[in-house]
Every structure is written in C-alpha cells, then in structure tokens.
C-alpha cells in the first residue's frame, strides 16, 4: 500500500512540475507570440485603456483623448485637425496610425522602454507607462500662413530653418480631419471610404509623399552643378548657347518662355528663366557629374525620413543627351517633393551646407522629462560655399528684378526662383506652379527660413497659373510669418 501511495505521489509531483513548466513556457517563452496573436484583444484593450500622449506645436497640444466609456475606452481627438493632419497623421482604432502617430507610436502609447522608471521595468512587470509626448519643430504661425495661403487649392508647402534643418511648416491641401477616423463603427468606415474615394485626395500628404516635375526651380540645382564642375567660371559672362537650341540627337527645338535668352549669362538665365541656357549647361556638365550633384541635394534618396518617410525625388541615372537636357530644366522624368525643393533652397541659403530635415524636436514623458532629443546634423555638402554665395546673389536678383517679384518683402533680403512645370500628354495638363525661396532679416547673420510652394490648381486657366503669380505670394506670407517669430 505504501509503495502505491509513493508512486501516486511521484506521479502527482511529475504532473505538477509539468504544469509549472507549461505555465512558464506560456508566460515567458510564448509570451510575445501570444501577445501579438490577432485573436488576442487584451493588448488592444490595454492600448486604448489609457489616454494617448500628445503631439505638441509651439508648446501646445494639437491632439487629445476622449473617454468614451466603451471597451476601447479612449479615442483620439484633434485640435485644428485639417491644419495639422500632414504633421500628425491619424490614430484610428479601426485603421491604425500614420505619419507622427505611426513613427512615434511607442512613445505616444506608453510602450517605449525609455518611458519606464528603470531598465527592463516593462518587461519584468508587463506594465504600460502613461503615454509620452512628442514635441515638434513646427511653428504655428508659419503653418497657418502656409495653410491659409493655399486656401484649399491642391498644393503643398514645406518650410525649413536652413541653419538647423528644423521643419517649420508642412502643409498639404485639400486636407481632412483625422478625428473622423479615430473610433470604430459605421461613421468611421464611411469617412474612410469617402476620404479615400475623393477626387481631391485629401489624405495624400503632398508635401512629402507626392512628387511633381519641379520645372524651372530645378535650374538652381543645374546652376550649382555647372559652377562646381567649372563649366561656368563667371556667372555674368555670356554663354555659348546655340540659338535656336536643338535638343542633342533630335530635330526638336527647345523654346523659351522669356525673351533675351540668346547667349545669356548664367545669372541672366536664372533671372528670366531661360530653358535653352540651362538645358545646354546640363549637357555640358554631363550625366555623371549631374547625377553626383543632384544626389548631394537629396535626389534619388529612398531612405529619407523626418521621421515619417519621404517619397524619393527622382533624377534618372541613365539618359540620352536630349533627355539630360530636359531633365536639367526640371522636366522629362525629373520629379521632386516640395520638401526636396525646400532642401534645395535651404542649401543655397546655408552656404552650401544642407542640414538633414527633422520634424520632432524631442520626445518626453507625460510629466515633461526629456526621453530623446534631436538636433541639427549635416545631410550633405551640396555645393562649395562660393557657389552658394553666387546662387544667393542670383536668387535675390530673381526677386528684385526678375520673375519672382511677388515674393519681395520690404527691408528683407529674399532670394527665390519661379517654376512652371509642364505635365500630361504633350504637356496638355495645367502647369504646376512652383516657387522656392529663402529670407534673411536685416541685421541677421543668416537666413531664417527656406520655403517651397507648389500649386496644382486644375480649375485655373493655363494662362493664369505661374510660379510667380500663384506660388510666390504664398511663399511671401510664409516667410513673413517665420521672420516675425
């Protein structure tokens, strides 16, 4: 009898050990896979069981959380949602997150280990900290000036601080209210369907996710390449540009929108925007040197993040000479985001030193203690300082005596470049109006802001749309707001 009891006790002990081992396997080894199993709603319930951290502009929150009393308790709210949608993105219980709500989700949701009071605290306790905050570099006045300037037309504005790379404004219109997507239910799915089906594509972030032919604004990049390569040594000397200019290897003549381009100097070609001179200079620089030059500005970079990902701005690396000529004036397959063209203006304004653009200044705990701090860092030396100085003078001449007069600000040094980019089959589409610029206040050691504006107004008459007419006044408003700050 005693032997049977001992055997039964041993079996029970063995079963107990097996249960303990299985519990340990579930709790420790399989914990991550079970946590991330789509059928496990506990994480989702926990995620929305506390208020989400906030995104701040100029020290004020542009987001919030509302207690719904439902199982997924807290829903995201937005202050001035359409104004800041290209910055915040959306945080939806149905459709997930985008833009800063996505890239900074660990901080905002409270799951970032850096929010914990001690290392490995969250792993040991399986706890979730209160959501932290994301402090952006955006300035409210600059953002509003860009948004109001576009006035709901299809287009975008990107504004940078040249000396640091801080993103001062990021606007895309038409916009939308991210709060419409926050919760669950038919109202959210209806809003999602309506927004995604709208012809105006309000959820498209045109400032960083849409590329356009940059047109004549790209001539600043071609001019930098020509000066750095020594193809042009004196920007005020006449060039040997043939007139009429026939695209190499073709019988196609390249037209100019302006008069006086025959044998024009580089400075004059920038001032009145001569296609022939700039196309010829691009061919003379050559494909290899042009590619090297444009990539210093950020073209062809597939990994640019601010931290939301930025669409690649394109400059083909294999082209015939006629294609290179067109690419050198911002046509053919050359495309750019507004942020990319703001980087071009910023590099000129900052003496050729292009700073990496960034949208998040720092992240903090709910109480305000800094978790991570971002700062200025160089992206590339886009051109030598002498070239940048010469281009600054040319861009100032564009505003003071050329096509960019609508961007002039009394008492302020403003440099700019207009662009009217053709697109569509046989260039039948309404041109995109571009303007890139920078502004330096009197007595200041360096420019305060670099701006890129694009307007794609399908309702405008072709003859009425131009970079100087449609985009330059918007840039002027943005620059004024940045200078007043």
Image (cartoon, rainbow, N blue to C red):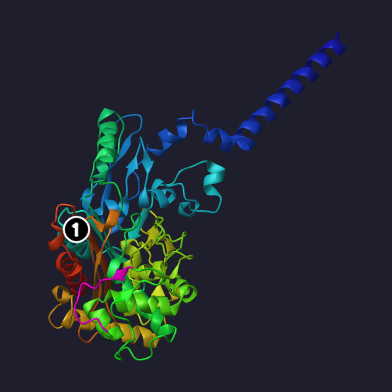
**Image-quadrant location for residue 13:** top right
Q: Is residue 295 above or below residue 211?
A: below
Screen quadrant of the C terminus: bottom left
Residue drawn at the location 30% of the way across and 35% of the way down: 183
Residue drawn at the location 52% of the way across and 36% of the way down: 36
Q: Secondary structure at mark 1?
A: helix
Q: Is residue 233 above or below residue 420?
A: below
Which of these two is toward me, 407 or 420?
420
Residue 255 is one of the magenta-drawn residues? yes
**Image-quadrant location for residue 378:** bottom left
User: What secondary structure prevails in the magenta region?
Assistant: loop
- Residues rendered magenta in the picture: 252-262
List x then y, in percent, for residue 299: 42, 66
List x then y, in percent, for residue 119: 55, 53
List x then y, in percent, for residue 204: 30, 49
Q: Which residue is mark 1?
A: 147
Residue drawn at the location 29% of the way across and 90% of the way down: 236
List x then y, in percent, for residue 184: 31, 31
Residue 200 appears in view = yes
**Image-quadrant location for residue 253:** bottom left
Q: Is residue 444 above or below residue 420?
A: below
Screen quadrant of the N terminus: top right
Q: Is residue 443 above or below residue 376?
A: below
Residue 409 is one of the magenta-drawn residues? no
Which of these two is toward me, 253 or 438?
253
Residue drawn at the location 49% of the way across and 28% of the way down: 39
Q: Residue furthest front?
A: 251
Q: Is residue 367 left or right of residue 113?
A: left
Q: How many marks?
A: 1
Residue 162 appears in view = no
């Amino acid at each position: 009898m005693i032997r049977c009891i001992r055997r039964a006790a041993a079996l029970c002990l063995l079963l107990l050990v097996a249960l303990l081992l299985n519990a340990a396997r579930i709790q420790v080894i399989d914990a991550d896979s079970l946590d991330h199993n789509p059928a496990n709603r506990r994480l989702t319930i926990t995620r929305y069981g506390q208020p989400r951290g906030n995104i701040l502009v100029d020290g004020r929150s542009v987001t919030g959380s509302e207690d719904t009393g439902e199982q997924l308790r807290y829903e995201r709210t937005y202050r001035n949602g359409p104004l800041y949608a290209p910055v915040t993105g959306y945080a939806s219980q149905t459709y997930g997150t985008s833009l800063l709500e996505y890239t900074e989700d660990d901080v905002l949701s409270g799951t970032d280990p850096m929010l914990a009071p001690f290392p490995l605290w969250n792993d040991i306790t399986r706890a979730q900290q209160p959501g932290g905050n994301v402090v952006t570099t955006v300035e409210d006045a600059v953002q509003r000036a860009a948004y109001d300037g576009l006035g709901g037309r299809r287009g975008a504005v990107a504004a940078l601080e040249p000396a640091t790379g801080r993103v001062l404004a990021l606007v895309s219109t038409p916009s939308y209210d991210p709060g419409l997507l926050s919760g669950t239910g038919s109202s959210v799915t209806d809003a999602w369907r309506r927004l995604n089906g709208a012809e105006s594509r309000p959820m498209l972030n045109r400032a960083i996710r849409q590329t356009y032919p940059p047109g004549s604004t790209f001539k600043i990049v071609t001019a930098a390449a020509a000066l750095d390569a020594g193809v042009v040594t004196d920007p005020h000397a006449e060039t040997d540009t043939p007139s009429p200019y026939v695209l190499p290897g073709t019988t196609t003549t390249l037209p100019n929108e302006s008069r006086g381009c025959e044998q024009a100097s580089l400075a004059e070609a920038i001032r009145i925007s001569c296609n022939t001179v700039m196309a010829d200079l691009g061919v003379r620089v050559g494909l290899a040197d042009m590619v090297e030059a444009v990539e210093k500005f950020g073209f062809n970079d597939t990994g640019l993040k601010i931290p939301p990902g930025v669409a690649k701005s394109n400059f083909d690396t294999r082209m015939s000479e006629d294609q290179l000529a067109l690419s050198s004036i911002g046509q053919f397959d050359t495309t750019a985001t507004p942020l990319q063209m703001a980087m071009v203006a910023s590099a000129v304004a900052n003496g050729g030193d292009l700073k990496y653009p960034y949208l998040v200044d720092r992240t903090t705990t709910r109480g305000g203690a800094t978790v991570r701090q971002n700062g200025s860092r160089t992206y590339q030396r886009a051109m030598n300082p002498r070239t940048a100085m010469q281009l600054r003078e040319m861009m100032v001449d564009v505003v003071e005596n050329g096509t960019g007069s609508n961007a002039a600000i009394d008492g302020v040094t403003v440099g700019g470049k207009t662009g009217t980019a053709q697109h569509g089959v046989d260039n039948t589409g309404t041109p995109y109006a571009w303007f890139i610029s920078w502004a330096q206040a009197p007595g200041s050691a360096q420019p305060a802001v670099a701006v890129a504006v694009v307007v794609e107004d399908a309702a405008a008459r072709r003859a009425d749309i131009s970079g100087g007419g449609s985009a330059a006044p918007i840039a002027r408003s943005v620059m004024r707001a940045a200078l007043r700050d």
